[in-house]
Image (cartoon, grey):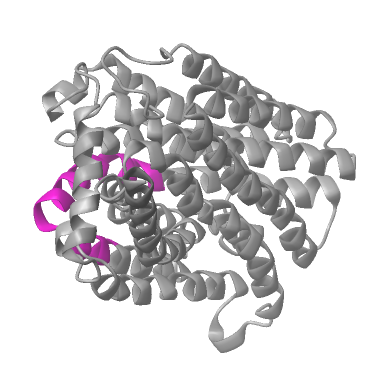
Amino acid sequence: MADSSSQRALDSVYRKAFWHLIPYIFVCYLFNYLDRVNVGFAKLQMLDDLHLSETAYGLGAGVFFIGYILCGVPSNLMLSKVGARRWLALIMVLWGALSASLLLVHTAESFYIIRFLTGATEAGFFPGIVLYLTRWFPSARRGRIMAQFMAAIPLSGVIGGPLSGWMLVHFSSHQAGLEAWQWLFLLQGAPTIVLGFGVLMAFSNGVENASWLSNAERQLLFHELDEDRKNTPKTAADSFAQVVTNPSIWLLGIIYFCIQSGVYAINFWLPSIIKVSLHQDLAAVGWLSAIPYLAASIFMILAGRSADAWRERRWHLAIPLLMGAGGLLLAASFATDLWIAMVGLTFATMGALTGLPMLWPLSGRFLTATAAAGGLALINSTGQIAGFTSPYFVGWIKDATHSTNPALYALAGIMVLGAVLTLSIRAKPEGAADLGR
């Protein structure tokens, strides 16, 4: 009975932590992703206005990730020094301002510069949030937590697609001296600045600083997190020096690269693929692009719950990757058939986006709490190389062949590789308790 009572008390405090943290993080991440990929919609008008080629667009979309990759690890290490609350607030204000300033772009060079700086400032946000959540939730609960906050990615597509399409149509009459794509950047970037200041009120640096927890609730969380740390495998990296020499960390980074290769191909090119293949107007493109993201948001949450319930991680990552690859192949093979192409794009989006939260609980096998800041950022930065290579590759192939299909076939192969590498990880590392690692 005591055990049952303790479990109910523990579940109650985790529900409290969830409702205090995750909804606000969810909204912040929604705008994070919206600000990152809205160039996919702006492209539909911006290229003609600025006389940019498809290759130049792909380079501009991808150069964001050079700044992101270079600054990811330093930013996360800085978060550990100055505290999550202040550092995440600063990151959000800066990237929101830079994202909105894309309305000032007039040349390819200015497009590249602002995208690079936006990537550099934004680099610490996602790995910082992942690190922050490891200080609240143990490994066995992280599958559903990661899936629920990362459901903001597909939801940004559900909301962002119709919203971006509406903006491009509604502001098409050169209102206030701005083109529709400039209004899109301004109106989707400004809310991030407001949310950044809100972080100062909504967040604490950790369990010990949370004024909304009682002392008894803090002790319950401290005990759970301490037990989780004790069950970290003995082979896990315990310093940044061990992180960079640990092959398993680099393996996770390569798997994340495979996932992101599919994700960014979808994020940056889905509107264009729909417009070219399905011959719809801009408003219809926005609504049609929401369908795959809506399906992905539901599938992502269900997969997270299943992974925690079964305490299994590898197959819950590998199967979505294979789904994503199959969807890309289907969409490319039947590009001129409305319904089959949409089914393919939907499966591709469901699989690729669900792979994102399914990867992160695996990192608990290879990182101690001490090494988490640098290790999580290194995995993220390695994977984000795909943010540069994937859109640039698709743009280059499109210019060279006048079709995105060869690029989609190649990216499907990369996602299959990610599934194979995932299944190469041992089901249970030596020294690890059965905590869903």
Nearest the viewer among 12 and 81 is: 12
SS assignment for the magenta stretch, majority = helix
Residue that lies at the very extreme toward the bottom in this rendered image: 176
* Residue 47 in sight in this render: no
Residue bounds of the magenta highlight: 64-91
Closer to the camera, 129 or 223? 223
Q: Residue at x 61, y 74 (%)?
A: 180
Q: Is residue 245 magenta?
A: no
Q: Position of residue 426 (x, y in %)?
A: 41, 12
The percent position of residue 205, horizontal first and vertical second, equals 18, 60
Q: Is residue 364 visible?
A: yes
The spot of residue 380 in percent (x, y) is 35, 37
Q: Residue at x 35, y 73 (%)?
A: 193
Q: Is residue 52 above or below residue 358?
A: below
Q: Position of residue 243 (x, y in %)?
A: 20, 25
For the view shown, which residue lies furthest in the front direction? 1
Question: Which residue occupies the extreme left position in the image?
Answer: 81
Is 234 left, or right, of 353 in this rendering? left
Q: Is residue 84 magenta?
A: yes
Q: Is residue 150 above or below residue 349?
A: below
Indicate left or right for 254 with 412 as reference.
left
Quarter occupied by residue 335: top right
435 up-or-down from 55: above or below: above
**Residue 262 or residue 401, whichever sits in front:** 262
